[in-house]
Amino acid sequence: MTMNERARAVLRGNDRGGYTIPTDGLYPYQWNWDSAFSALGFATFDRARAWEELEKLFEAQWPNGMVPHIIFRADEPGYFPGPSIWQADMGPMPSSGISQPPVVASVIRALAEAEPEQAAGFIKRIDAWHEWWHRARDPKGTGVIAITHPWESGRDNLPDWDRPGDMIDVSGVGEYTRSDTSLVDNDMRPEKQDYDRYLALVYFGRERQWDPEKIAVENPFFVADPGITSILLRAEKDLHVLARGAGHETARIEDRITRLENGLELLWNEDAGGYVARDMRSGDQSRRASAASFLPLYAGILTHKEELLTTLREFAERVRYLVPSFDPRDEHFDHIRYWRGPAWAMINFMIANGLRDIGEYNWADRIRSDTRELIRNGGFAEYFSPIDGRGCGGGTFSWTAAIWLAWELDE
Ligand code: DGY
């Protein structure tokens, strides 16, 4: 089988009837941003299936606009924590009570060129979701978007969350059994201390019936994320193009774009040479750059372009494959442990596209060819060591296959 055929087989194999799971076993439900990237992959060979994926995602949208991070369509006893732990039944079907990086508008814009009418049908729903991010995760209008759980960032155990996480009381968590570590090597997954915090935050949210107003004020973890903020900014710009094309009113979208453009500077850290997380309770900034530090370029923010390219060059001196998820010069860097060092195909895709859009073709090509080599050698793994290239985490992974296919079109 060719790589393309294998990639398509991964997506087909993870299809559960109109929606795609990230990979069998480890993640047996529909995850939000995984699903959006899967749609991008399906769009290269089955357009109808791509649109169906996106429809299925929005079927779970809450009345308040939130699109949840996991949709529990079936009960899979093999996953922890499942629907009975989340107890989030505020939407039309069981789901988690938090969201995930809003890449959907950008995926839909890519599909819209060939099928503008299909795309137009999503504008109102995306607009409600984007509005939710601002209202629920930036109620004070600072222009940066906070996450209320590391899972909301999609970059679960990034060292940026370590210090803000010290504020989380884990004394009520008790005994529990994880399922992830029986499926994947322990060294590649978050540690117990992280998991205790993840669960404590789930318990905290469910006690407040996942009410975003209460959570914004009371949650022990409220941390502005350069990843979500940049991805949302790019998505707002893509939504703006879709809305204008369809003749919709765009003033509200423009206001949100301006707010985020002004806000991002709050996350700049000169010493780190990148945009980093900021704990909105204490005001503390993280000290080191991560892969998300480059995402403001993808959102079209060029204020610190030169400094970011310097940081990227320094990263490249330390690892064989770009882009490590965390600064390889830091003591917390770990080349195989999930978000503490490994390279991820879909993050690379966003960074490389951002660099291409601003004319940094050499860097864009370097990141794309590194990613393709990682996948060619390491398979359709969840993530990869940026040092030795080994495939880590889950195998037959949807978004890795999807990015392979999306990039194949560009070759
Ligand atoms: C997990 O189960 O590890 C997921 O990252 C939660 O979204």
Image (spheres, rainbow, N blue to C red):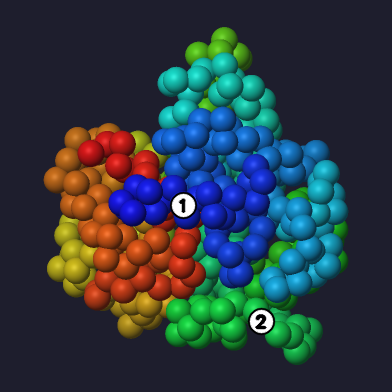
**Quarter holding the C terminus?**
top left
Dot 2 or dot 1: first in sequence order is 1
Residue 9 marker:
1
Secondary structure of residue under mark 2: loop
Query: Residue at the spot x=66%, y=35% of the render?
Result: 55
- The residue nearer to you, when weighing 148 against 85, is 85
**Quarter holding the N terminus?**
bottom left
Query: Residue at the spot x=54%, y=36% of the render?
Result: 50
Residue type, numbered disc 1: Ala
Indicate whether 118 appears above or below 375: above
Secondary structure of residue under mark 1: helix
**Number of residue marks:** 2
Expressed as whole percent of the image width and height from the top left, the position of residue 306 reads 19, 48
Expressed as whole percent of the image width and height from the top left, the position of residue 336 reads 38, 77
Residue at the spot of label 2: 178
Indicate whether 337 appears above or below 63: below
Indicate whether 290 appears above or below 17: below
Residue type, numbered disc 2: Arg
Q: Using residue 408 as the reference point, say whether residue 203 is left or right of it.
A: right
- The residue nearer to you, when weighing 211 against 35, is 35
Cα distance between the residues tagged 2 and 1: 29 Å
Residue labelled 2 has its Cβ within 8 Å of some atom of ligand 1:
no
Indicate whether 80 appears above or below 153: below
Query: Residue at the spot x=30%, y=42% of the render?
Result: 408
Expressed as whole percent of the image width and height from the top left, the position of residue 178 reads 66, 81
Q: Quadrant of residue 78?
A: bottom right
Expressed as whole percent of the image width and height from the top left, the position of residue 65 reads 72, 39
